[in-house]
Every structure is written in structure tokens, then in C-alpha cells.
Image: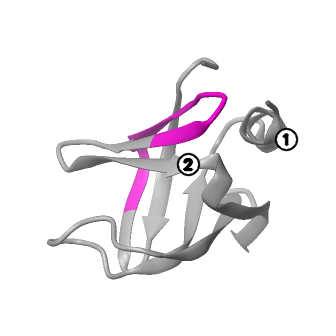
Amino acid sequence: MTLPMRIGVRIANFNVTWPLAGVKVYSDRIIISIFMVKKIELLKSNIVSIQSYKLLPVIGEGLLIKTRSKVKYGKLFFTPTDEIIIWTLKNKNKLISNLTKH
């Protein structure tokens, strides 16, 4: 496992700002935890691509993760989606490296 990072995350119509979400990267999966809501587990085998994403300069930069199929992440907050955006204030390239290695 790599060191956990504090992040923001957007899943379907639900957005959580930094630092209320976290990410942990393992060799076979990525776990995104959302403060007081839930943990989301993404298997790396279900990930199609990880690419840079920019909504606004500096404060709106992150990573777009696309999955093979639409996944339902929860009953209350998320509609099925095949895209997750991770917002990060730290080194985006380091996070990409951690997400794509293994």
C-alpha cells in the first residue's frame, strides 16, 4: 500500500471537497473513503484509464478515472457511473504514478 492521501472526489452527481475524502492505493485495488459516508473499492482490473483532468486552473485540477462498466456506488448519493474525478492539491503526477504502478 502507498501512503494514504487526502483528496476531494466527484462521483456522478456527488462532490466532496478536499480534505473530506481519502485514497489508499494497493497493488490490486484503490479504496476511496468519503468522510462519514462510505468507502468505495475500485478493482484495478475494472479501470480503463486514468488521465489528467482540469476544470479550473490550480483549484480545479485532478484525475479522471474511467471504469469498464457503470458501477453503482451507493443507494443514497450516487447514480451508476463509469467516471470518478479525484481532486488533489498535492503532486498530481505522484498520484498518477501510484495509481498506475503494480
Vertical comparison of 101 with 45: above or below: above
Q: Which amino acid lies under the numbered mark 2 shown in the image of this protein?
A: Leu
| Crowding at mark 2 (Cα within 10 Å: few <14, some 14-19, many 20+) | some
Q: Which amino acid lies under the numbered mark 1 shown in the image of this protein?
A: Asn
Vertical comparison of 8 with 5: above or below: below
For label 2, the residue is 43
For image coordinates 77% across by 36% down, the residue present is 91
Give the magenta part as a residue range: 16-31
Q: For the C terminus, give its image quadrant.
A: top right
For image coordinates 64% across by 42% down, the residue present is 89
Q: Earlier in the sequence, mark 2 or mark 1?
A: 2
What is the secondary structure assignment of the residue under circle 2? strand
For image coordinates 17% across by 72% down, the residue present is 75
List x then y, in percent, for residue 30: 55, 41
Question: For residue 28: magenta?
Answer: yes
List x then y, in percent, for residue 55: 68, 74
Q: For the N terminus, give its image quadrant.
A: top right
The numbered dot on residue 56 is: none
Vertical comparison of 54 with 80: above or below: above
The numbered dot on residue 93 is: 1
